[in-house]
Amino acid sequence: MTSSPDTGYLGPAAVTWPILSHPGALIGGLRALLIQSLHPLAMAGVAQHSDYRTRALSRLQRTAAYVGATAFGTVETADEAAARVRRMHQRVRGVDPVTGKAYSADDPETQVWVHAVEWHSFLAAHRAFGPQLTPDEEDAYLAEGVVIAALVGAREEDVPASVAQMREYFASVRPSLCVSSAARDSISFVSSPPITRELLPVQLPLRVFSSAAIALVPRDLRRLAGIDRPAAVDVAAIAMARPWLELMRTPIGARLATSVIGGRSRAPRDRAEAAHGEMTVAAMRDRRAELGITGPGITRRPTRLREAAAA
């Protein structure tokens, strides 16, 4: 098996592929939303520019479509998705009422925060619900994420590229995290989804997955966010999520998942699977062995976008 020009930035040997293909990635996405809210500048941008309160599924589907396009899509597909995000980021700027600091979605530090939390949350969910990965595979996955972060302008050297680097990064930003009123609203929205016309059809699984997402948030951050609870509740939440995740592997469950994350997010993954085989950990290991790859499954780097950003 060889890498084709249409493989994308991450190829068939990418550890990212089975992690993002696992149904538990949806729980990882909800975990990311909870933690991302604790960064005051990132939260200010969401509070002042996002429509998540009135179009929650639309926001989730846009994010899922971007993740699918960049992780599974061709270079052209990934570049187009990244360009759309960068255009949107140009409008997201203002002043954070909590710190009094100016914020911008183009700020490299904020970009690293948003990416690191999201990418690590997918890994946290896979640790809880997916087949066990080796330490080298986890490091390879995080290194692959550096390429994805660079697509929207993050400086590659600033993005954590291993489990150890990710741990150091989170320790470095922990003192700056806080809970604003906007953060409380956002956290409440994710942890206790409102019964709206848009969310009503998926209310039950969404609440199950939201509870499981809380269980995956570090305890000190849960205390900060005001969503801490006994460990027994976490165990029950994880157990309750498992049958729902198995259901998502069935045709009925797949339709339910598509109604939540949207069809655009699945199309690049489905094309990659048709071209390169199953998106399981076992299949990924077979592809890595066949290709002789032991490190990150990166096929190319987004030099064109970085050159355009620097121009």
Image (cartoon, grey):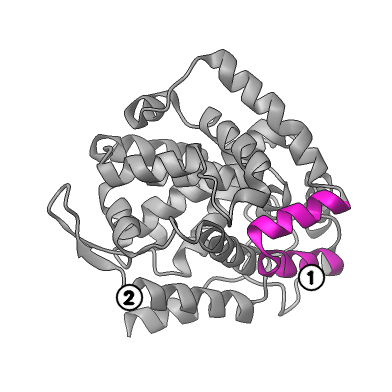
Give the residue at x 54% y 71%.
301
Secondary structure beneath label 2: loop
In reply to whether residue 252 is colored magenta, the answer given is yes
Q: Residues within 10 Å of mark 2 (few under 14, many from 20)?
A: few
In terms of image quadrants, where is residue 171? top left
Q: Residues within 10 Å of mark 1 (few under 14, many from 20)?
A: some
In this rendering, would 95 be left or right of 29? Answer: left
**Disc 2 versus disc 1: distance between alpha carbons?**
31 Å
Work out whether 277 lies above or below 130: below
Counting from the top left corner in percent of width and height, residue 280 is at 80, 48
In reply to whether residue 185 is colored magenta, the answer given is no
**Label at residue 280:** none
Work out whether 95 lies above or below 2: above
User: Which mark is first along the chain, 1 or 2?
Assistant: 2
Indicate the amino acid at tag 1.
Answer: Arg
Q: Of residues 25 and 171, which is closer to you in this image?
A: 25
Q: Nearer the viewer, mark 2 or mark 1?
A: 2
In this rendering, would 263 be left or right of 112? Answer: right
Question: Which residues fall within the magenta stretch?
Answer: 251-274
Indicate the amino acid at tag 2.
Answer: Gln
Secondary structure beneath label 1: helix
In terms of image quadrants, where is residue 87? bottom left
Quadrant of the drawing holding the N terminus? bottom right
Counting from the top left corner in percent of width and height, residue 70 is at 59, 67
Instruction: Report the residue marked by disc 1.
Output: 271
In terms of image quadrants, where is residue 108? bottom left
Give the residue at x 71% y 67%.
263
Counting from the top left corner in percent of width and height, residue 109 is at 30, 56
Instruction: Report the residue marked by disc 2.
Output: 90
Q: Of residues 234 and 119, which is closer to you in this image?
A: 234
